[in-house]
Image: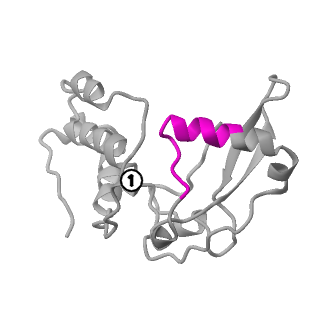
């Protein structure tokens, strides 16, 4: 079952609103009943954004943005893709274990990372490997990176198929 959003005044729409609505309609009903895994963590005050965008003429675009902030944004991942979880991290994590432990503890305390998980959750959790790279000009500081392309053939990126409107998904740091 998919949702259809009808808009009056298509001329007032953001250029890619129709494409974004199509991505949102691909959202399958979640079978996961674990509340912790269905929650999106953001530092943005979504209710305030909703108020600030209430006069924006493209209501479908606003709906997409607000729903994405609350429920997560859809990037075209095909849910029937076969994922293979990582069993180890990149070599850089073994070189700086204190940096990894500190980073994870900080992210957990801010609610931006979850875990550790009980084994009974393994059906619902995909694990990506991660690594460390030095932060630009901050000597001794590191950035944690998540490898969405590992393991070839079973990665998150392997499950994102290009479309005519979204030929490539790019991440910029």
From the top left corner, tell me how far across and down residue 163 is, in percent: 47, 63
From the top left corner, tell me how far across and down residue 99 is, in percent: 76, 38
For the N terminus, give its image quadrant.
bottom left
What is the secondary structure assignment of the residue under circle 1?
A: helix
From the top left corner, tell me how far across and down residue 50 is, in percent: 24, 29
Relative placement, left or right, of 81 versus 145 is left
**Looking at the image, residue 42 lies above or below residue 2:** above
Q: Is residue 114 magenta?
A: yes
- Residue at image x 46%, y 72%? 120
Q: Which residues are magenta?
A: 102-116
Relative placement, left or right, of 30 versus 132 is left
**Looking at the image, residue 114 lies above or below residue 62:** below
Q: What residue did someone put label 1 on? A: 36
**Looking at the image, residue 26 lies above or below residue 165:** below
- Residue at image x 74%, y 64%? 88
Q: Is residue 80 magenta?
A: no
- Residue at image x 23%, y 35%? 58
**Colouring of the image:** one colour
For the C terminus, give its image quadrant.
top right
Q: Quadrant of residue 152?
A: bottom right
Relative placement, left or right, of 161 versus 143 is left
For label 1, count other residues whose C-alpha is less than 10 Å away and answer few (under 14), some (14-19) or many (20+): few
**Looking at the image, residue 8 lies above or below residue 167:** above
- Residue at image x 53%, y 36%? 109
């Amino acid at each position: 079952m998919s949702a259809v959003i009808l808009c009056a005044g298509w001329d007032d729409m953001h250029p890619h609103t129709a494409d974004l609505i199509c991505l949102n309609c691909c959202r399958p009903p979640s079978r996961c009943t674990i509340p912790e895994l269905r929650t999106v963590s953001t530092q943005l005050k979504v209710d305030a954004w909703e108020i600030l965008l209430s006069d924006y003429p493209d209501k479908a675009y606003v709906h997409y943005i607000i729903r994405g902030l609350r429920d997560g944004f859809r990037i075209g991942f095909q849910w029937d893709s076969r994922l293979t979880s990582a069993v180890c991290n990149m070599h850089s994590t073994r070189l700086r274990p204190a940096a990894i432990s500190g980073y994870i503890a900080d992210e957990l305390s801010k609610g931006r990372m979850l875990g550790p998980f009980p084994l009974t959750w393994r059906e619902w959790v995909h694990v990506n490997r991660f690594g460390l790279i030095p932060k630009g000009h901050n000597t001794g500081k590191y950035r944690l990176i998540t490898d969405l392309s590992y393991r070839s053939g079973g990665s998150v990126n392997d499950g994102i198929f290009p479309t005519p409107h979204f030929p490539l998904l790019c991440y910029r740091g």
